[in-house]
Image: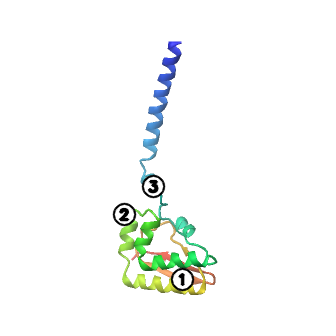
Amino acid sequence: MKRATDRKSNRREFLKTSIGGIVAGGCATTARLKTLAAAQNSKPLLTEREFNRRVPSPRRTDAYTREIEEAKRDLLGYLNSHFHLTSAQSAKVKSLSKEDITRLNESLDKALKNKLQIKLHCGGDLSRAGLTTRFTPDSLIIEPHGQ
């Protein structure tokens, strides 16, 4: 009986150390570390998908208006309160020019007035500086770009 218990203990120890090694090795990539950091903050990592999921439909007038007004008041504060930003993303948002922010706020006002859906399109790279806004018949498209 004692041998069976010893085997179970050895097996348990083996599984604990093996799983720990696999988890540690698998988490060594930058993307996984960013995801883990976002999970620890209980905020999603700022990505195109998460941003677009966050912004309410214009049909939900009160929530839509609150969301836009919050973003217009303080873009970096808005992003930090709802998303986990990487240090590169945070630096790029901070580096946006006053003209970029003014243009974005004017576009957000127009979207609010015309009840347009707000969408972020970035090609997967939110670490680029600057931005462009454009309109489609039913949406405001915000596109980050390089300087």
Mark 3: secondary structure: helix
Q: In the rendered image, which residue does mark 1 sit on?
A: 134
The quarter of the rendered structure image containing the N terminus is top right
**Crowding near the residue tagged with mark 2, few <14, some 14–19, many ≥20 C-alpha atoms within 10 Å:** few
Amino acid marked by disc 1: Arg
Q: CA distance from mark 1 to mark 3?
A: 30 Å
Amino acid marked by disc 2: Ser
Amino acid marked by disc 3: Ala
Q: In the rendered image, which residue does mark 2 sit on?
A: 87
Disc nearest the viewer among 2 and 3: 2
- Residue at left offset 46%, top offset 45%: 26
Residue 84: quadrant of the picture: bottom left
Q: In the rendered image, which residue does mark 3 sit on?
A: 31
Q: CA distance from mark 1 to mark 2?
A: 27 Å
The quarter of the rendered structure image containing the C terminus is bottom left
Q: Is residue 5 above or below residue 132?
A: above
39 displayed left or right of 137: left
Give whichever of discs 2 and 3 has the lower sequence position.
3
